């Protein structure tokens, strides 16, 4: 009875289709899966159908690119209403900026004599939320780099010639948007931020949970964040952050969390909905009197 709550498909920078990802989930005997593509919920409808076919519980989600005090943070939004108008409008903005960034990255590459066309990246990415991994894969495909790692090392990572900063929403705005669309806001892979100082501020701004279990967290790191979760009364999540075959071996199955954490998340969503219903009823009766 386990769950993987951090997964990507080819609707962002993963390589698996939703159907392939759900099939892997069944092979790893997952009871629940959340799709957390970067800045998009477009894959959720297909993932939901694929999970239903495989007998797996599906949680609609996304990984929002956010920032706080100049630090890039990833905020996971769980149980999002994928038809929420404002959510879709905000995500469309993110996607437009991501597409524009591909043009900027390719222009920077061309300036240093690397002849990669943005069109080649868009063709390979075939999604609305393209990112650096797609540029890296296109460089490999065109024979301009041997590996994805080489592409990042030579061109794409920070301070390299084709690095272009990404649009980020403030962490507070991302959490507000997640809450407005019915979801829970969770800080992704906190150890990758290299600082826990941001956590109390995020909690004050409405953070609901923290990703204690992640591929890049050691056992000691996970225990550290479990303690922080306890301190701030935060929900606990975790997942493999599988991007399919993009990094050689697929990560799905390597991080599984007990299903009880999913139950806690669902209880919280139910509580919030119930409170909203009570608040609305109180408001209506106040207006009637
Ligand atoms: P972007 O959202 O376009 O800035 O790209 C971020 C993505 O690039 C994340 O999914 C990372 O896992 C991936 N990434 C970052 N550094 C590397 C690297 N050195 N090799 C391969 N992928 C990377
Ligand atoms: Zn990614
Ligand atoms: Fe992330
Ligand atoms: Fe991720």
Image: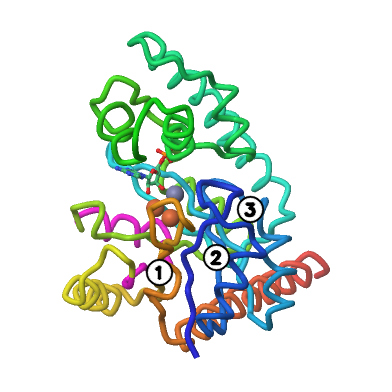
Q: Report the mark closest to the observer, 3 or 1.
A: 3
**Does the segment drawn in magenta span residue 94?**
no
- Estimate the x, y position of residue 149 in percent, counting from the top left: 30, 41
Label count reads 3
- Estimate the x, y position of residue 275 in percent, counting from the top left: 62, 75
Q: Earlier along the polypeptide chain: callout 2 or callout 1?
A: 2
> Which residue carries the number 2 mark?
78
Q: Earlier along the polypeptide chain: callout 3 or callout 1?
A: 3
Crowd rating for badge 1 (residues with CA inside 10 Å; few <14, some 14–19, many 20+): many
Give the answer, above or below, for where 28 lies relative to 71.
below
Q: Report the mark closest to the observer, 3 or 2.
A: 3
| Magenta part of the chain | 197-213
Give the answer, above or below, for where 56 lies relative to 166.
below
Mark 3 → mark 1, Cα distance in angstroms: 20 Å
> Which residue carries the number 1 mark?
209
CB under 8 Å between discs 2 and 1: yes
| Residue at 49% from the left image edge and 79% from the top image edge | 3
Give the color scheme: rainbow, by chain, secondary structure or one colour: rainbow
The residue carrying mark 2 has its beta carbon less than 8 Å from ligand 4: no
Mark 3 → mark 2, Cα distance in angstroms: 11 Å
The residue carrying mark 1 has its beta carbon less than 8 Å from ligand 3: no
| Residue at 47% from the left image edge and 74% from the top image edge | 4
Which of the labelled discs sits on residue 41, or is there none? 3
Quarter of the image where one finds residue 248 = bottom left
* Closer-to-camera residue (208/274): 208
- Estimate the x, y position of residue 134 in percent, counting from the top left: 49, 37
**Does the segment drawn in magenta span residue 208?**
yes
Q: Earlier along the polypeptide chain: callout 3 or callout 2?
A: 3
Crowd rating for badge 2 (residues with CA inside 10 Å; few <14, some 14–19, many 20+): many
């Amino acid at each position: 009875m386990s769950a993987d709550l951090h997964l990507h498909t080819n609707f962002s920078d993963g390589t698996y289709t939703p159907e392939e990802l759900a099939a892997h989930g069944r092979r790893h005997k997952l009871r629940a899966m959340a799709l957390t593509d970067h800045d998009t919920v477009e894959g959720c409808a297909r993932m939901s159908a694929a999970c239903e076919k495989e007998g797996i519980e599906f949680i609609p989600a996304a990984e929002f690119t956010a920032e706080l005090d100049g630090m890039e943070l990833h905020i996971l939004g769980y149980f999002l209403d994928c038809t929420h108008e404002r959510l879709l409008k905000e995500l469309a903005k993110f996607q437009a900026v991501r597409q524009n960034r591909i043009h900027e990255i390719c222009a920077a590459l061309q300036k240093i004599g690397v002849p990669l066309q943005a069109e080649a990246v868009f063709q390979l990415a075939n999604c609305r939320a393209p990112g650096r991994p797609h540029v890296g894969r296109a460089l490999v495909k065109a024979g301009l780099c041997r590996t994805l790692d080489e592409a990042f090392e030579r061109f794409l990572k920070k301070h390299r010639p084709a690095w272009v900063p990404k649009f980020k929403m403030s962490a507070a705005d991302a959490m507000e948007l997640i809450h407005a669309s019915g979801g829970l806001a969770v800080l992704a892979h906190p150890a990758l931020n290299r600082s826990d100082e941001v956590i109390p501020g995020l909690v004050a701004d409405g953070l609901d949970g923290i990703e204690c279990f992640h591929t890049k967290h050691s056992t000691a790191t996970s225990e550290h964040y479990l303690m922080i979760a306890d301190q701030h009364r935060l929900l606990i999540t975790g997942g493999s952050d599988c991007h399919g075959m993009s990094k050689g071996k697929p990560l799905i199955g390597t991080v599984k969390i007990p299903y009880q954490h999913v139950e806690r998340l669902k209880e919280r969503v139910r509580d919030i909905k119930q409170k909203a219903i009570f608040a609305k009823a109180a408001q209506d009766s106040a207006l009637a009197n």
